[in-house]
Image: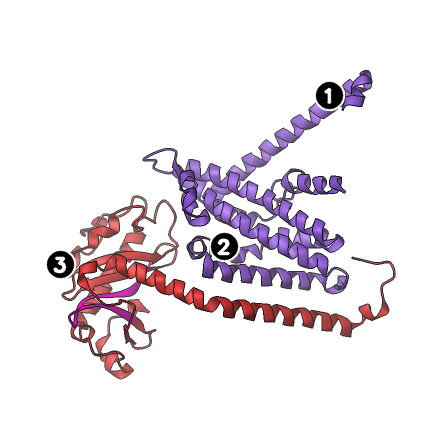
Chain colours: A purple, B red
Amino acid sequence: MNNDYRRIAKDGLWDNNIVFTQSLALCPLLAVSSTASNGLGMGLASTFVMITSGMIVAMLRELITPQIRIPIFILIIATLVTLVDLWMNAWLHDLHKILGLFIPLIVTNCAILGRAESFASRNRVLPAMFDGLMMGLGFTMVLVILGIVREGLGSGTLFANASLLLGSWAAFLELEIISDYKGFLLIILPPGGFLVLGFLMAAKRLIDDAQEKRQALKNTDVSTDNASLVNS
Amino acid sequence: MKTPREAEYRKRVGYQAALLGGFSSLATIFLVMGNISTKEPILIRHQEDLQNSLAEVIPADYYNNNLVENPLQLVPPGGKSITFYRGTKNNRINALAWEISGQGYAGKMRFILAVDNSGNILGIRVLSHTETPGLGDKMEVEKDDWILKFNGLSLDKLPQEQWQVKKDGGHFDAFTGATITPRGIIKAIVDALKFFRKNQTELLTLNIKKRSAPNVAKLTTGASSHE
């Protein structure tokens, strides 16, 4: 059981990461990742929608027939996103001014429908919610990393406007790495997002490859030395 | 989700239609509830936004009333009504602020413009735009002080042919790499100032709350850029 959850967590954050591995959700990703704060806000909003949609879909999975599952999933997701949009406009207004344009993009985030279809509709409520959380956090992680790189290279700041998102205590996050920086336009524009994303994906492949090699090496070690098998 | 033996009724069209209909109704109910519960706060937030941007363009010693209260509505012919927010002191209108829009490089730009009662610009701030970040967004006051250079100017102080970017022989700097954006902004401002000059008496009369359309039609010729 515990193993199941560990598997889900590893899948969501790394092995089956929405962006790195499944290459989904690129549209909202590139639109908001020009600064780290925007990325974080969008990631958290998406995570919230993924957890709730996972929960609802898993709860209703016995009721929904396969023939009409897709329209119902879309209906659920669209309703949730609209509610998030309204709530944010009412109670997180400053953030909504920045992210407002992008919130409706969450509907276009096919990753949410994908998880509803491939995970939540086949699993119980808790694992489905956990999967939503982990997939969402994996997505948030990529958004924030991409945002940090693009913001740092593009405008020379880090986590600008973070206090709008997290409250005034987060002001310490707002850094100006390079003062009087003229900016690097390409990185701020969407093509820059693609470029940076490409490098990040390549880096992930390198890490995976290195890990695989180490694993292979370990396995050959094990076959020659049986004593270490017990320990590992 | 797929069970090997699926109950017969689940395959019927009626069941599926009812299910889909049920979900749609539920979704509608939730959305209506969400809309009702957030309507008030969102309205308040928008009022606050407006008040903040008005306070930014009209200096505090020009008025002692609530700027958002009791605005003047004018309806140009064939256009949407323009709301004029009036800063008054001792029953005199000292400042007037309204929304103007101009055509930028990538779409419409919205500004709020404030003038004093003789047509001098008190302040301009951008409300929304879709210009290229890093190139065309220097009209944001957080990024550059370009927009502040309009303060204090008027059609009397700067002759009309000077209301252009330097490239076109005018008075104002353009942005590096972006000329279309400042052109659009300057044009919007000039149009607004002309509009003010033409309708000055009307705009500075305190007691008018609403003007009927025919009366305004005569007044607002040349205000096409405000639509």
Q: Which residue is mark 1?
A: A217
Chain of the residue on which disc 2 is drawn: A
Residue at the outermost front position? A169
Q: Are marks 3 and 2 on the same chain?
A: no
> Looking at the picture, how far across and down is residue B7, in whole percent?
85, 66
Q: Are marks 2 and 1 on the same chain?
A: yes
> Looking at the picture, how far across and down is residue A190, in whole percent?
48, 45
Chain of the residue on which disc 3 is drawn: B
The quarter holding residue A229 reads: top right
Residue at the outermost right position? B5
Please name the residue shown 72% across and 59% down the image.
A59
> SS at mark 1?
helix
Mark 3 touches mark 2? (CB < 8 Å)? no
Mark 3 touches mark 1? (CB < 8 Å)? no
In the picture, the quarter occupied by the N terminus of chain A is top right
Chain of the residue on which disc 1 is drawn: A
Q: Separation of disc 2 and disc 1 at Cα?
A: 46 Å
Please name the residue shown 45% across and 43% down the image.
A35
> SS at mark 3?
loop
- Disc 1 crowd, CA 10 A, few/some/many (<14, 14-19, 20+): few
- Foreground of the two, A74 or A191: A74
Magenta region: which residues? B83-103
In the picture, the quarter occupied by the C terminus of chain A is top right
Name the kind of residue labelled 2 in the image: Phe
Q: Is residue A102 above or below residue A134?
A: below
Q: Which mark is residue A102?
A: 2
> Looking at the picture, how far across and down is residue B134, in whole percent?
36, 44
Q: Which residue is mark 3?
A: B159
Q: Separation of disc 3 and disc 2 at Cα?
A: 43 Å
Name the kind of residue labelled 3 in the image: Pro
Give the side of residue A71 with respect to residue B35, left or right: right
